[in-house]
C-alpha cells in the first residue's frame, strides 16, 4: 500500500476536507479518535437498519441457509416466515 502524504487546512468552521486520493475507495462514515497526539480517521461501513438483522447472532441459521443457497445456486427453499421472527 502506497502511503501518500497530503496537507489539509482547517477552515473557519473547523472543518477539514479530505483529498479524493484518500477517500476514493473508503467509507463515507469515519470513527474519529486521538491516539498519542495523532488524529485517526477509521473508515466505518454503515449498515442500513433494514439489513442489520443479518448480523444478529440469533439469525445465524437463516444466514447459513442463504449462504448455502447462493453457493449451490440450487432450489433450496428458505422459509420466509423465519425473517419475521
Image (spheres, grey):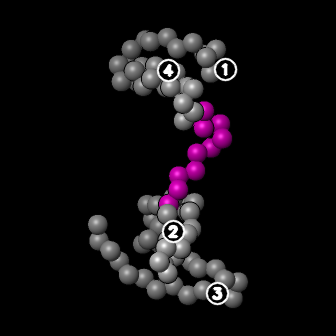
Mark 4 nearby-residue class (10 Å; few <14, some 14–19, many ≥20): few
Q: Decide: few, some or many residues near mark 1? Use Cα within 10 Å; few <14, some 14-19, many ≥20.
A: few
User: Is residue 18 at all visible to an observer of this figure?
Assistant: no
Label pair 1/2, CB-CB below 8 angstroms: no
Q: Position of residue 32 (x, y in %)?
A: 56, 68
Q: Are marks 2 and 3 in contact (CB under 8 Å)?
A: no
**Which residue ends up furthest to the right in the rendered image?**
13
Which numbered disc, 2 or 3, marks the residue that appears first in the sequence? 3
Q: In the rendered structure, does residue 45 fall within the stretch colored magenta?
A: yes
Quadrant housing the N terminus? bottom left
The magenta span reads 43-53
Numbered badge on residue 67: none
> Which numbered disc, 2 or 3, marks the residue closer to the eye?
2
Q: Secondary structure at mark 1?
A: loop
In space, the residues marked 1 and 2 are separated at their CA atoms by 37 Å
SS label for mark 4: helix
Report the residue marked by disc 2: 41
The CA span between labels 4 and 3 is 50 Å
Disc 2, SS: strand
Query: Who comes first in sequence, dot 1 or dot 2?
Result: 2
- Residue on which the image places disc 4: 61
Q: In the rendering, at what x and y percent does residue 49 appear? A: 66, 41
Q: CA distance from mark 2 to mark 3?
A: 18 Å
Please say whether residue 35 is visible from this viewpoint.
yes
Q: Which residue is mark 1?
A: 85
Secondary element type, mark 3: loop
Q: CA distance from mark 1 to mark 4?
A: 12 Å
Q: Is residue 54 above or below residue 32?
A: above
Judge whether 56 appears above or below 64 on screen: below
Amino acid at each position: 500500500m502506497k502511503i501518500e502524504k497530503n496537507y489539509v487546512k482547517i477552515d473557519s468552521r473547523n472543518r477539514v476536507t479530505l483529498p479524493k486520493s484518500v477517500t476514493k475507495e473508503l467509507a463515507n462514515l469515519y470513527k474519529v479518535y486521538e491516539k498519542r497526539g495523532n488524529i485517526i480517521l477509521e473508515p466505518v461501513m454503515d449498515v442500513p437498519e433494514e439489513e442489520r438483522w443479518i448480523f444478529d447472532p440469533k439469525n445465524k441459521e437463516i444466514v447459513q441457509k442463504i449462504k448455502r443457497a447462493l453457493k449451490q445456486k440450487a432450489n433450496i427453499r428458505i422459509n420466509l416466515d423465519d425473517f419475521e421472527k
